[in-house]
Image (cartoon, rainbow, N blue to C red):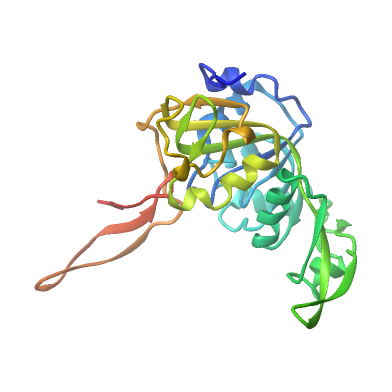
Amino acid sequence: MMDKTYSTAAEAVADIPSGASLAVGGFGLSGNPIQLIDAVLASGPTDLSVVSNNCGVDGWGLGVLLNAGRIAKISASYVGENKEFARQYLEGELEVELMPQGTLAEKLRAGGSGIAAFFTRTGTGTQVALGGLPQRYDSEGNVVKASEPKEVRSFALGGEEHDYVLEESIVTDYALVHAAVGDRHGNLVFNEAARQFSPAAAMAGKVCIAQVEKLVEPGEIDPDDVHLPGVFVHRIIEVGTDIEKRIEKRTVRVRETGDGPADAGHASSGTADGTAKKEA
């Protein structure tokens, strides 16, 4: 079916069952597919296994599914902005698989490319390769599950021999991503920081569901501007540009004027689509 559009987010995610695995795009709060996440929350699946760079913040992004107790396992790189995440992890309610950020991106991209595994120098000589990273605690704070050791081999890449650790790629049941522009064939254009993990997450999903701010007709996107070809996208919905885009962390500094410092009432921050903007 070349026209991959769905009318609503609820319709697009309706078949996601309990126990499903989801690859979710976004970098911090940039590019969070919040309308799709909210639709998953409303549809009710539980025991979800989520793969994403981070797990949102308390009450936003993937944090809404976490707060509702819908996530059983999260595979991520950065989880430091979510207090509820820390509580569930340390109290034995949540299984967590942490990995280097670049390794996570490549595990998703490789999975979407049909590559079962790859060797990388990242993590060699650490618990990433040696095992022992706590993945689940019990209610008493004891480690009940830790990461397993991984295969390490030596390669002479470029004439220099180093150890490399074997990383298995990731394929998930579904993927949820946010893009700035998409067409009915599923070709997507991401905006700035939102491009960090979203294309890789989209590739890894057996069924990729994309929400876009602007839906256009096939041919309106210059082929050179396409960041993710429609072959990886199965469903697409338009959410419009008038959607809430929260800021993960606001940094305030004195605004410089021709006469020197004027005030500290402005902050440079990122938005949900990856754009830098000033907030009064």
Which residue does the image show at 43% across and 29% down from the upper left? 219
Q: Is residue 135 above or below residue 209?
A: below
Looking at the image, residue 140 sits to the left or right of residue 46; the answer is right
Q: Quadrant of residue 3?
A: top right
Looking at the image, residue 66 sits to the left or right of residue 110; the answer is left
**Percent x, y of residue 166:** 84, 63
Question: Which residue is more in the foreground, 38 or 149?
Answer: 149
Looking at the image, residue 250 sits to the left or right of residue 190; the answer is left
**Percent x, y of residue 38:** 55, 29
Q: Is residue 184 above or below residue 196?
A: above
Looking at the image, residue 172 sits to the left or right of residue 57; the answer is right
* Quadrant for the N terminus in the image: top right
**Percent x, y of residue 143:** 86, 59
**Percent x, y of residue 42:** 60, 23
Which residue does the image show at 32% across and 63% down from the upper left? 252
Q: Quadrant of residue 112?
A: top right
Q: Quadrant of residue 186?
A: top right
Of all residues, the one furthest to the bottom in this rendering is: 160
Question: Which residue is more in the foreground, 193 or 52?
Answer: 193
